[in-house]
Image (cartoon, rainbow, N blue to C red):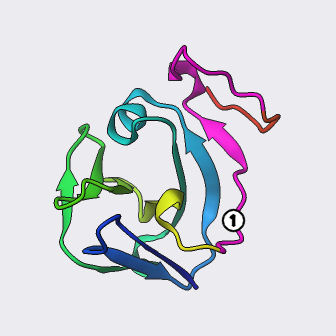
Amino acid sequence: MIRGSCLCGDIRFETAAAPQGPSMCHCSQCRKQSGGVWASAYVPETELILHGPVSWYAASVGAERGFCVRCGSFLFWKAHDEDTISFALGAVEDPSGLKIEKHIFCASKGDYYEIADGLPQKP
C-alpha cells in the first residue's frame, strides 16, 4: 500500500495498485509549480483513493494539476485523455520501495543544473 499526504495533512491519498513509471519531470510547468524537478509515479485513476479537498488547476488544454489550497502542496497531475493519475513521490510516506526510472521533458530543463545519474533522459 502506498500512502501520502500534503504538507498540512488536509489531503491524503492511497493506492494498493503498483505505481508505474517513477520519473523526474523537468518541464517548465513542473519546475514553476514545485520549485524544482517533480518526481512522480502513476496508477489507474480508479485505483487512487483521495481524501480531502483537492483543488484542480487547468495548467494546459490537455491536463490539470491537483494541489492543496491550504499549504500549496502540488500533489497530482492528470491528462484529460488518459485514465491514469500521477502523484508526487515527495508526498509519499517512507518506505515506498519506488526508484526513479527515467527523466522526462529534459529538453526544457533548467540551465542551472545537470542530470548526471545515468538514467534514461527523454526529450
- Dividing the picture into quarters, in which one does residue 5 lie? bottom left
Going by the numbered disc 1, the residue's amino acid type is Leu
Is residue 19 shown above or below 63? below
Q: Which residue is mark 1?
A: 98
Is residue 118 shown above or below 49? above
- Dividing the picture into quarters, in which one does residue 99 lie? bottom right
Q: Residue at x 54, y 30 (%)?
A: 105
Q: Residues within 10 Å of mark 1 (few under 14, many from 20)?
A: some
For residue 31, side relative to residue 80 (left or right):
right
- x and y percent of residue 17 in the render? 57, 80
Q: Residue at x 35, y 64 (%)?
A: 7
Q: Total of numbered circles in the picture?
A: 1
Quadrant containing the C terminus is: top right
Q: Residue at x 56, y 20 (%)?
A: 107
Residue in front for this viewpoint, 27 or 4: 4
- x and y percent of residue 28 in the render? 40, 27
Is residue 47 shown above or below 88? below
- x and y percent of residue 83 in the render? 41, 65
- Bounds of the magenta segment: 95-116
Quadrant containing the N terminus is: bottom right
Q: Residue at x 59, y 26 (%)?
A: 106
Q: Is residue 44 magenta?
A: no
Q: Secondary structure at mark 1?
A: loop
The residue lying furthest to the front in this view is 8
The residue lying furthest to the right in this view is 118
Q: Is residue 101 magenta?
A: yes
- x and y percent of residue 59 in the render? 25, 40
